[in-house]
Image (cartoon, helix red, strand yellow):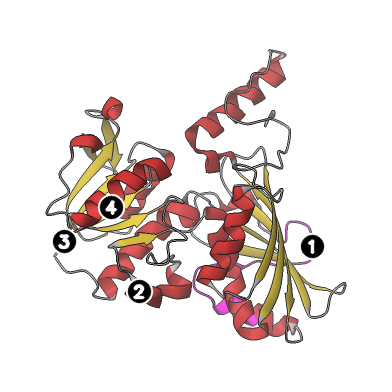
Amino acid sequence: MGYRIAVIGATGAVGREILKILAERQFPIKEISALASPRSAGKEISFGDKQTLKVQNLETFNFSGWDIVLSSAGATLSSIYAPKAAKAGCIVVDNTSQFRMDPDVPLIVPEINVDDLKKMKRNIIANPNCSTIQMVMALKPLHELFKIKRVVVSTYQATAGAGKKGMDELYTQTKDSLTGNHITRNHFTKQIAFNCIPHIDAFMNDGSTKEEWKMSVETRKILDPNILVFATCVRVPVFIGHGEAISIECEKPINLAKARQALNKTNGVILYDERKDEGYITQIEAAGEDASYVSRLRIDPTVPNGLGFWCVSDNLRKGAALNTVQIAEALIQSKLISN
């Protein structure tokens, strides 16, 4: 038994990670195609340890007869090719912002709201924003215990969130800074090497950025429409891995022991919280890992029923590629797709 899988945006950072994870998890594949723009067509790309795929031209690809499309090529291309693939009978798992707030498109983190897959109406499923995914993974068990009313989050987001160009700019600027060369900016609005930029995505009318808005509206769609979220999203000079300082205010009194117990039992979350030097997880340690790590768990005495913690995760894996593949696995497990 196997499925015909097409990966859109296969040559990008997330696309390559999707192919890697499909191979790692031994996804039941009958046939797989790597799709990208015409300029990448004909190139070879790795799939697993021993196999390579020849990249095909997305613009001329025929989706008829394919089962699942995993798309990560930007919102503009998704707006064109996701509906095209869905119309051809594929189920599309889209990793862009294009369909996330569409009421007919479920927004899925499998450990949290897998049952929402049944609400699929357009053969399209949305993968949430990377910063949202790791946060709601930690919030879910705490919400079940204490009923969260409000979240205040400050993010420390890696350059991988801006794709290969963002990572390349950090590398180049770091090298130029250390060697005394002139530093140029091509991608970020300010120098990213040895700096933090409180600006991710476009500004909105209220002064928030779109990244901050995404964290708010996506959390409500995934977890609970009554949760208020105030986010400040910051790009930091890290290659891979997002960090988040999260404070929550709840309806019920906080019991720290029960909070620890709930987080420890949550699939996909690892609590590593020792009140000593090195008793926490940082971005560089989370890189290459699948879990959302929670550290620095403590009572917030400044608000009623408050709790604060630190959360890190690999934004290319759980924040994007892994969650996409898990959705595809959930489609099979839920018998929402047959081969």
Quarter of the C terminus within the rendering = bottom left
Q: Residues within 10 Å of mark 1 (few under 14, many from 20)?
A: few
Element assignment for label 1: loop
Q: Residue at x 73, y 32 (%)?
A: 194
**Residue 83 image label:** 4
113 to the left or right of 330:
right
Query: How many discs appear?
Result: 4
| Mark 2 vs 3: CB contact within 8 A | no
The answer to if 268 sits in the magenta stretch is yes
Asked whether disc 3 touches disc 4, contact meaning CB atoms under 8 Å apart, the reply is no
Task: Report how far apart the C-alphas of labels 2 and 3 lie in the structure.
Answer: 25 Å
Q: Residue at x 53, y 39 (%)?
A: 162
Q: Percent from the top left, x then y, of residue 276?
A: 79, 62
Q: Is residue 158 visible?
A: yes
Circle 2 is placed at which residue position? Answer: 119
Q: Residue furthest front?
A: 205
Q: Is residue 254 magenta?
A: no
